[in-house]
Image (tube, grey):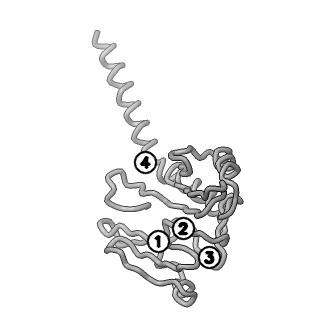
Amino acid sequence: MRGKKRKFLIGAIILFSLLIVYLISYKYMIVPYQIKELNDNMVINGIPYKIGDKMDNLDLDILRHNGWEEITTDDNSILYHNDAIGSVNFDGFPDLSDDFKFILFRSWKDNFSIFGIEVGSNVSEAQTILKKRGYKEEYDTTFVKGRISISFPSENDGKIAMLEIFLRSSDWFYKGNYK
């Protein structure tokens, strides 16, 4: 009887250890690969930023000198908005390090392309492309893969009216943004 308890306890410890290793490695191994895949297939004309880039490392004069208005929404978010193009959002997690990252880009112009999808593309074709890339449909026109969310509201004619890419928080307790 003691041997069975010991084997069960050792098995439970090994299983628990594997679970902990998976949960820790997921954010550092799988998510950055998905972000790299996204950035390799994302083109934003006029803005050389990549999703997940630290704001401190970016030349923000590109936005300031091209008609983008800075809007500070709160201590955790800085939004740049241009009526003709869209929005760029930098979110931070001051509870951890006062570090801001490029996490959201929204556009209703054809200056933004992700996996060949852009404003004006056919919605059903966009859905097919994202499903082939491993994205799961969360809502009608919102697709998610890991921490990455791609949304595209459509017009009545079945064409994409706006395209949005968003990097969700990796913090399970929602105290901060992508680390």
- 4 or 3: mark nearer the eye: 3
Q: Nearer the viewer, residue 12 or 36?
A: 36
Q: What residue is shown at x 64% (from left), y 79% (from top)? A: 46
- The residue carrying mark 1 is 89
Q: Which numbered dot is residue 24?
A: 4
Residue at disc 4, secondary structure: helix
Q: What residue is shown at x 60% (from left), y 63% (from top)? A: 161
Mark found first going from the N terminus, 2 or 4: 4
Q: Residue furthest top?
A: 1
Q: What residue is shown at x 68% (from left), y 46% (from top)? A: 128
Q: Which numbered dot is residue 48?
A: 3
* Rendered view: 105 above or below 33: below
Q: Nearer the viewer, residue 89 or 60?
A: 89
- 1 or 4: mark nearer the eye: 1
- Marks 2/1: CA distance? 9 Å
Mark 3: which amino acid? Pro
Q: Nearer the viewer, residue 46 or 92?
A: 46
Answer yes or no: do the residues labelled 4 and 3 have beta carbons within 8 Å? Answer: no
- Marks 1/3: CA distance? 14 Å
Residue at disc 3, secondary structure: loop
User: Percent from the top left, x then y, of residue 130?
Assistant: 64, 49
Q: Nearer the viewer, residue 42 or 95?
A: 42
Mark found first going from the N terminus, 2 or 1: 1
Answer yes or no: do the residues labelled 2 and 1 have beta carbons within 8 Å? Answer: yes
Q: Quadrant of residue 9?
A: top left
* Rendered view: 85 above or below 168: below
- Marks 3/2: CA distance? 15 Å
Mark 2: which amino acid? Arg
Mark 4: which amino acid? Ile
- The residue carrying mark 2 is 106
- 3 or 2: mark nearer the eye: 2
What is the crowding at mark 2: few (fewer than 14 residues within 10 Å), some, or many (at least 20)?
Answer: many
